């Protein structure tokens, strides 16, 4: 049996071949497999082989993962050969066959590491020829400069004998990955502009096509790409994301049909073309982030350090395999990104929170605050505005719960959306806001503008950080206070994370019914405790006074959770009933909960304002049984003119 292991952020793996029935894993050197990390127990786990079956017993203090299931200390679980075992920060795979097990993601990370090594070698030689940083500063977009740079890259490749016989095996190994990237870029560049999100259009430039192209080779390459598109049946797919997903998942199966057409000169040309593009991206664009920024299948990009770039795809965070050439290059590209939005980042101001022109959120932090090197997080702004029907189709909410929330918004109930980071709180706020009647005057307050309201009568406010002199700052709390003077019917605050929670509660209590906001919390019980803390950040009040404020302000709490495998779902919808002085706390009842672990189910509890919803024909009692047919929904134009005077609270 072969056992393969590696650190989760490294593509290079170690291998041990053994026929022993017991394999000991841990930090101590006496183990069969030694994992050198303080996060691993001295004796972490024992793997047993019995009658061709594998089982793992966790004998350490720390937990470990068998597939997607966590195994705590003292627990034992069977697993199959090829299934991934994770003992942080290591990943292990057991294989009983001769072939080395390696997943698609691991293989791609390894191949990208090889490409990055090639680029690093060329980049070092280029720096000896001229100052690339000065070139970037003085000659951005200059066609002649690009041409000179490409010719220098060709010269360096010849000097390093990059396409000599010694590197023939390397080129053979990476050509499949290079061709797949070219195909994805081809699909993006050839798409209709309306198919691309605004960030993809922002990162489009002339550097994707070489200035020193060879027409005959370009014709061959175009034929290869069209051949691949036919074999992958991409023309059957209308959506760009679907086409790219198909390439990501199935290109490895189609590549053997393409390989015979890649003669030696063609392989060299394709690899050289990629080196030119990637190095031009580094000098003039966003480096290894260039392609990630415009890929519609990626929702978040996280640079941990120069050689660790993670992405979120389909709700799952994975290592991209891409990397920056150095910390200096990373910092330079971060400066380039924030400069586009009129911000700066340097030693005196090493932290920036900004918004790109398309609405994507950028957070960058560099040394001395970031100890391991520059770090960057980009949450891409979705080009598609989700509707409630989309959330139902995705399994994030049931039709019954959706109809209940819709009725609450129309009936001017104050709604609080809670959840962890990246669970989709803003998306839910966007969806709920679509039910607000168009005649209402809405004021939105956000740190970075993400809400996309379709109503006409909307005033959008965004906070502003202090300038270099430390003046001119306007916080969320300042804007919430100002919003109260703007005669709003409803106030929507993107997120309460400080003293603005007090002002939001007061707004909800003083004639601004139907307002909404979000708070970071793990459950409806936790969110009440967090609100208390946030209010105390603004003013010292007795806890019971704060709880009374919360009880009279908040009607409904919507809890969102990220489930295993990345799916986001509404797991609780609760009513804040009242403050009970005898219990010395808030009384909260779940209207829907996630008891079966798969979907929302009605608890049978009727909210105190149910009579008002039914009297105004906003809801039928069938919602409690989940029997609501989506086709029977009240048309939007009907509920827009429904009278909603008063809050109808009991």
Image (cartoon, rainbow, N blue to C red):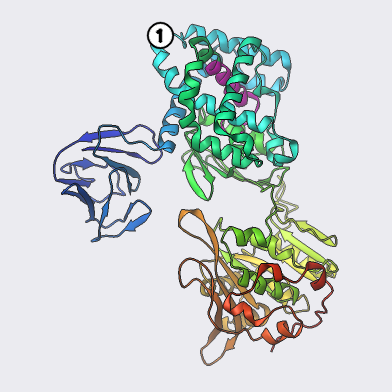
- In the rendered image, residue 647, in percent from the top left (x then y), is placed at 75, 82
- Depth order, front residue of 221/321: 221
Across and down, in percent, residue 252 comes to: 46, 31
Residue 383 in the figure: left or right of residue 31:
right
Q: Which residue shows up at 50% across the image and 22% down it?
A: 258
Q: Is residue 2 above or below residue 46?
A: above
Question: Which residue lies at the image location 47% right of the left edge and 43% below the top edge?
Answer: 318
Q: Residues within 10 Å of mark 1 (few under 14, many from 20)?
A: few
**Majority SS type along the magenta span:** helix
> Residue 229: within the magenta?
no
The N terminus sits in image quarter: top left
Question: For the point 62% across and 83% down, which residue is it?
Answer: 607
Residue 616's x, y, as percent? 77, 82
Residue 426 shows in the view: no
Q: Is residue 440 left or right of residue 1?
A: right
Query: In which quarter of the view is residue 93 placed?
Result: top left
Q: Residue furthest bottom?
A: 582
Q: Nearer the viewer, residue 148 or 213?
A: 213
| Mark 1 secondary-structure assignment | helix
Asked whether residue 280 is drawn in magenta, I would say yes
Q: Quadrant of the C terminus?
A: bottom right
Q: Nearer the viewer, residue 475 or 62?
A: 62
Q: Is residue 521 visible?
A: yes
Tell me where residue 237 sits by quadrant: top right
Quadrant assignment, res 581: bottom right
x and y percentages locating residue 268 in the rendered image = 51, 13
Q: Badge 1 is on which residue?
A: 165
Q: Residue at x 66, y 36 (%)?
A: 337
Q: Which residues are magenta?
A: 270-290
């Amino acid at each position: 049996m072969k056992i393969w292991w590696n650190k989760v952020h490294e593509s290079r793996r170690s291998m041990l071949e053994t026929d022993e029935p017991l394999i000991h894993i841990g930090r101590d050197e006496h183990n069969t497999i030694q994992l050198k990390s303080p996060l691993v127990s001295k004796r972490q786990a024992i793997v047993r082989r019995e009658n061709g079956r594998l089982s793992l017993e966790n004998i350490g203090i720390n937990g470990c993962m068998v597939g997607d299931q966590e195994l705590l200390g003292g627990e034992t679980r069977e697993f199959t050969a090829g299934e991934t075992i994770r003992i942080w920060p290591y990943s292990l795979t057991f294989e009983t066959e001769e072939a080395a097990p390696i997943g698609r993601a691991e293989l791609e990370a390894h191949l990208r590491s090889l490409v990055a090594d090639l680029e690093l070698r060329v980049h070092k030689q280029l720096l000896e020829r001229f100052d690339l940083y000065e070139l970037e500063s003085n000659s951005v977009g200059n066609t002649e400069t690009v041409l000179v740079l490409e010719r220098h890259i060709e010269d360096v490749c010849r000097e390093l004998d990059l396409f000599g016989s010694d590197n023939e095996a390397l080129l053979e190994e990476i050509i499949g990955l290079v061709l797949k990237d070219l195909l994805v870029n081809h699909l993006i560049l050839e798409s209709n502009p309306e198919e691309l999100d605004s960030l993809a259009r922002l990162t489009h430039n002339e550097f994707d096509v070489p200035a020193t192209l060879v027409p005959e080779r370009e014709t061959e390459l175009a034929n290869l790409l069209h051949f691949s598109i036919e074999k992958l049946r991409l023309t059957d797919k209308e959506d760009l994301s679907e086409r790219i997903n198909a390439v990501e998942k199935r290109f490895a199966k189609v590549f053997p049909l393409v390989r015979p057409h890649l003669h030696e000169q063609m392989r060299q040309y394709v690899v050289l073309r990629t080196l030119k593009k990637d190095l031009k991206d580094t000098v003039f664009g966003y480096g290894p982030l260039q392609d990630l920024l415009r890929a519609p299948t990626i929702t978040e990009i996280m640079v941990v350090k120069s050689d660790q770039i993670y992405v979120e795809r389909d709700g799952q965070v994975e290592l991209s395999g891409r990397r920056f050439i150095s910390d200096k290059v990373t910092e330079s590209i971060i400066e380039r990104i924030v400069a586009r939005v009129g911000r700066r980042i340097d030693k005196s101001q090493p932290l920036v929170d900004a918004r790109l022109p398309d609405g994507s959120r950028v957070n960058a932090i560099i040394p001395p605050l970031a100890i391991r090197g520059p770090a960057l997080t980009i949450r891409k702004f979705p080009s598609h505005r989700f509707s409630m029907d989309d959330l139902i189709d995705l399994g994030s909410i049931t039709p019954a719960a959706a109809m209940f929330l819709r009725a609450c918004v129309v009936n001017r109930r104050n709604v609080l959306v809670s959840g962890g980071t990246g669970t989709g709180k803003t998306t839910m706020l966007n969806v709920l806001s679509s039910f607000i009647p168009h005649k209402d005057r809405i004021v939105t307050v956000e740190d970075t503008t993400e809400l996309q309201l379709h109503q006409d009568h909307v005033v959008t406010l965004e906070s502003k950080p202090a300038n270099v002199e430390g003046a001119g700052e306007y916080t969320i709390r300042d804007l919430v206070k100002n919003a109260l003077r703007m005669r709003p019917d409803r106030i929507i605050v993107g997120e309460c994370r400080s003293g603005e929670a007090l002002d939001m509660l007061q707004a909800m209590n003083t004639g601004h019914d139907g307002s909404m906001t979000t708070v970071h919390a793990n459950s409806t019980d936790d969110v009440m405790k967090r609100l208390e803390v946030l209010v105390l950040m603004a003013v010292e009040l007795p806890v019971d006074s704060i709880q009374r404020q919360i009880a009279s302000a908040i009607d409904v709490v919507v809890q969102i959770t990220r489930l295993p495998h990345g799916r986001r779902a509404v797991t609780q919808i609760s009513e804040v009933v009242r403050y009970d002085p005898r219990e010395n706390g808030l009384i909260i009842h779940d209207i829907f909960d996630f008891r079966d672990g798969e979907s929302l189910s009605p608890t049978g509890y009727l909210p105190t304002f149910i009579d008002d919803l039914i009297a105004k024909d906003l809801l039928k009692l069938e919602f409690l049984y989940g029997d609501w047919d989506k086709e029977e929904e009240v048309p939007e134009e009907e509920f827009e003119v429904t009278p909603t005077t008063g809050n109808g609270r009991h």
